[in-house]
């Protein structure tokens, strides 16, 4: 049985064009980019070309792009690096960070670490739409605030956050703004200057590049302390021998994304709407989580009354469709998604929710097949639940 993949927000298949570039680089460009001989300089040229490709996708200067091992490292470097490098507030007040309750664990866990170091953190709440209110960010600011960190697009709901407005607030307060752009890059246009972002995190494997490579945009003049210590690579912000093949692959993926973004976004939005309209029309007790407007074009998070999400994932997998739930594993126990509980869902409704995220290879026929499989699977699981509780 052929499986169809609808979990692109978790990771994406490597695009053929990117794979070709990666293999060529692995085979031919094996020098250390820090070496001054012929082989090292060949690697350096490829590395800097990739840096320019990534910078072009976000409308930045190539000198502002730092390669990392992925989105989590980029988030940690941005959050920890910006806060630790910030001058201490006057009168021995505690440094303060503003973030949102629906951030990725890479940001929330970094903020928790800062709290252990004595930094105060405000997690701005969101309403049922899953969108941060810029006024709440403004209200949370203190004289000692040294960083605002709000994601560009939520990984579970797909909701796009009002970064331009938040960026304006950050500039007025002279507070650096970090934006986790992992789920937005390649799905919607990104212009870091227009957004007002001082730091912008990116991940290769969400962009049809391989796992193990990412990048952080650091606006010129932004203070940033390194997390690791060693050589002088990446302008002394991220020491260690650069992953040249990974960076080259990310560069190729960035160039590809920029080329197809407009057409692919329109196509995916059409497929997502087709899927949602079919499901909502056929399955009773189905509803969309979060705002239906202002979302990245590929993401849909749906809730199904009386159905266990984990059981539905398995049922759909047996029918040939790969999807994911909104739940995460914590300490060996299934806990409801912090994002879904943050928008007001109780634990049962959060566990009855699923995320469907589309990608380049998905077709209308696959979307229709998924909707049909979902209808049959939900009906089957509801019958089982009724018989068990009868």
Image (cartoon, helix red, strand yellow):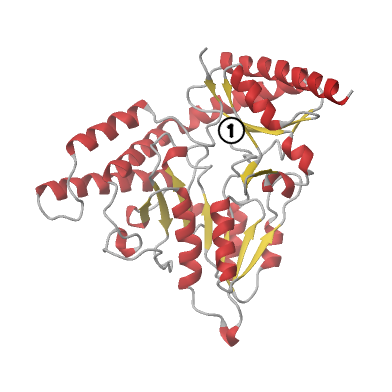
**Of residues 73 and 138, the one drawn nearer to the viewer in this rendering:** 73
**Of residues 382 and 279, the one drawn nearer to the viewer in this rendering:** 382
Q: Is residue 66 left or right of residue 264?
A: left
In which image quadrant can residue 284 be found? Answer: top right
Farthest residue, direction left: 37
Farthest residue, direction right: 390
Residue 41, compared with residue 88, is above or below; it is above
Residue under the point 18% across and 43% down: 30
Crowding near the residue tagged with mark 1, few <14, some 14–19, many ≥20 C-alpha atoms within 10 Å = many
What kind of element bears circle 1? loop
**Can you say which quadrant of the picture contains the C terminus?**
top right
Q: Which residue position holds label 1?
A: 297
| Residue 146 in view (yes/no) | no
Residue under the point 62% across and 49% down: 331
Residue 350 coordinates in the image, percent (x, y): 74, 39
Residue 61 coordinates in the image, percent (x, y): 36, 54
Residue under the point 42% across and 60% down: 219
Residue 317, compared with residue 154, is above or below; it is above
Residue under the point 10% across and 48% down: 38
**Of residues 181 and 323, the one drawn nearer to the viewer in this rendering:** 323
Q: Is residue 159 left or right of residue 60?
A: right
| Residue 92 in view (yes/no) | yes
State how many labels appear.
1
Residue 97 coordinates in the image, percent (x, y): 60, 67
Residue 93 coordinates in the image, percent (x, y): 61, 81
């Amino acid at each position: 049985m052929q499986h169809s993949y609808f979990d692109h927000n978790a990771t994406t298949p490597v695009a053929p064009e990117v794979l070709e570039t990666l293999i060529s680089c692995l085979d031919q460009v094996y020098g250390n980019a820090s070496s001054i001989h012929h082989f090292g300089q060949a690697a350096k040229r490829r590395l800097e070309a990739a840096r320019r490709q990534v910078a072009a996708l976000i409308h930045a200067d190539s000198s502002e792009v730092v390669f990392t091992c992925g989105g989590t490292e980029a988030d940690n470097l941005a959050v920890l690096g910006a806060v630790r490098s910030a001058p201490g507030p006057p009168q021995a007040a505690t440094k303060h960070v503003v973030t949102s309750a629906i951030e990725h664990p890479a940001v929330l866990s970094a903020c928790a670490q800062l709290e252990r170091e004595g930094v105060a953190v405000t997690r701005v709440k969101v309403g049922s739409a899953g969108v941060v209110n810029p006024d709440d960010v403004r209200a949370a600011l203190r004289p000692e605030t040294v960083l605002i960190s709000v994601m560009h697009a939520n990984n579970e709901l797909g909701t796009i956050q009002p970064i331009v407005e938040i960026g304006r607030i950050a500039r007025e307060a002279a507070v650096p703004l970090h934006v986790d752009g992992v789920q937005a890059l390649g799905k919607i246009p990104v212009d870091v200057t227009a957004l007002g972002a001082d730091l912008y995190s990116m991940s290769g494997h969400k962009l049809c590049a391989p796992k193990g490579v990412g990048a952080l945009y650091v606006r010129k003049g932004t203070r940033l302390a390194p997390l690791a210590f060693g050589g002088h690579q990446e302008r002394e912000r991220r020491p260690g021998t650069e992953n040249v093949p990974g960076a080259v692959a990310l560069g190729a993926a960035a160039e590809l994304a920029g080329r197809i973004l407009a057409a692919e976004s329109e196509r995916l939005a059409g497929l997502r709407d087709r899927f949602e309209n079919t499901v909502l029309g056929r399955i009773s007790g189905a509803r969309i989580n979060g705002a239906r407007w202002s979302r990245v074009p590929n993401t849909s998070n749906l809730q199904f009354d009386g159905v266990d999400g984990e059981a539905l994932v398995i049922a759909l997998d047996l029918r040939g469709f790969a999807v994911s739930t909104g739940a995460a594993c914590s300490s060996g126990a299934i806990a409801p998604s912090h994002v879904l509980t943050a928008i007001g869902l109780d634990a049962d409704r959060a566990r009855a929710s699923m995320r469907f995220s589309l990608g380049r290879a998905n077709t209308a026929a696959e979307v229709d097949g998924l909707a049909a499989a979902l209808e049959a699977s939900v009906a089957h699981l509801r019958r089982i639940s009724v018989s068990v509780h009868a």
